[in-house]
Image (tube, rainbow, N blue to C red):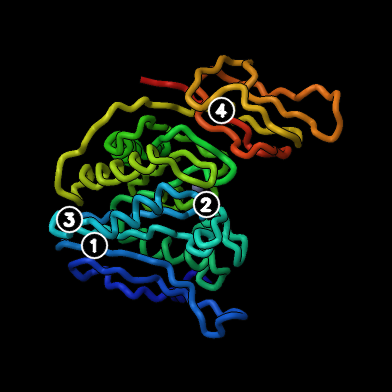
Amino acid sequence: MSSHRPSPIAPTVDFDRDGVQHGFLRLPYSRDDSAWGSVMIPICVIRNSKGPAALLTGGNHGDEYEGPLALYELARTLDPSQVSGTVIIVPAMNYPAFRAGTRTSPIDKGNMNRSFPGRPDGTVTQKIADYFQRELLPRADIVFDFHSGGRTLDFVPFCAAHTLPDKAQEQKAFAAVAAFSAPFSMRMTEIDAIGMYDTAAEEMGKVFVTTELGGGGTSRAETVRIARRGILNVLRHAGVVAGAVETGKTQWLDMPSGDCFCFAEDDGMIETMVDLGEPVEEGAVLARIHSTGRTGVAPREIRAKMSGMLAARHFPGLVKAGDCAAVVAVKVD
Ligand SMILES: [Zn+2]
């Protein structure tokens, strides 16, 4: 069984040592420009005696920036005297993708969030996933994974957890989402949960929390502020960092079914008819796709399959058949 092989990744940090350590997960990767070279994935461990452990990640997708911006700063500034337990920070989980500014890895085209449980003898992306699956996730009590929309999507800023069969586990995750205090809090449904880091953590019984904080392949001042305040709130809520949670107003959202998602069925130029956060009625035109090969062609309309609020939209001006064009969510109390 390949999963019984040891991971090729060698950490330069000791997870059981007190204090602050800035190091690497070193993954051997022999290639044209570096015969005995490695991928050096930055990692920070901040530990102060026994206690709960939080595993914090950004850059699961390499073109999403609120997580890395919050986590590189947290690694630089978190005072270990304020910590009870362990904070493990990997600000750029798919480091090759992060360096390239792309969603997937330029080495193997691996999408980290479709690569779990990974393989110790697989591609670079699969080896990183395997290390998280077998070495890092088991150490964690709470797992927080930052996402944003990347180059192709844009979201209203929300913190999220999934509805789960284990209601005690689900309740703990939603309590952490509430502590994050983003403008929106989501009960999230996935299009395809197979291979996700989320699923790997949840199947291990971990409290798993994630975000979607904007997108477009960049960040905004507001979304970075939300990320930085939110992650400290979650660590305080979990009892890993001292201090009170700074609660703020949040609007809970639900994605009750697959009708949330609207996919383009045509290539062309997309015209957004509703902005993020605006209310939509079932049947309303969310976007129009204009054919650009000739003049005189009527645009194709993308209509909402349910009433709610526009929570996400396709970001670039050009769209392809199959692209996620819009996501509608429902406001709940
Ligand atoms: Zn992502």
Mark 3 to mark 2 CA distance (whole Å): 30 Å
Q: Amino acid at mark 4?
A: Cys
For marks 4 and 2 on the same chain, the one whose residue lies earlier in the sequence: 2
Residue 48 point in image, percent of width and height: 16, 62
- As drawn, is 268 to the left or to the right of 27? right
Q: Which mark is residue 308?
A: none
- As drawn, is 328 to the left or to the right of 289? left
Q: Amino acid at mark 2?
A: Asp
Pointer 1 residue: 46
Residues at marks 4 and 3 touching, judged by CB atoms closer than 8 Å: no
For marks 3 and 2 on the same chain, the one whose residue lies earlier in the sequence: 2
Q: Amino acid at mark 1?
A: Ile
Mark 4 to mark 2 CA distance (whole Å): 24 Å
Q: Amino acid at mark 3?
A: Val
Residues at marks 4 and 2 touching, judged by CB atoms closer than 8 Å: no
**Which label sits in the foreground, 4 or 1?**
1
Name the element at disc 2. loop
**Which label sits in the foreground, 3 or 2?**
2
Query: The C terminus lies in which quarter of the figure?
Result: top left
Pointer 3 residue: 83
Name the element at disc 4. helix
Mark 3 surroundings: few (<14), some (14-19) or many (≥20) residues within 10 A = many
Name the element at disc 1. strand
Mark 4 to mark 1 CA distance (whole Å): 40 Å
Residues at marks 2 and 1 touching, judged by CB atoms closer than 8 Å: no
- As drawn, is 156 to the left or to the right of 111? left
Number of marks in the image? 4
Mark 1 to mark 3 CA distance (whole Å): 8 Å
For marks 2 and 1 on the same chain, the one whose residue lies earlier in the sequence: 1
Residue 299 point in image, percent of width and height: 76, 24
For marks 1 and 3 on the same chain, the one whose residue lies earlier in the sequence: 1
Residues at marks 1 and 3 touching, judged by CB atoms closer than 8 Å: yes
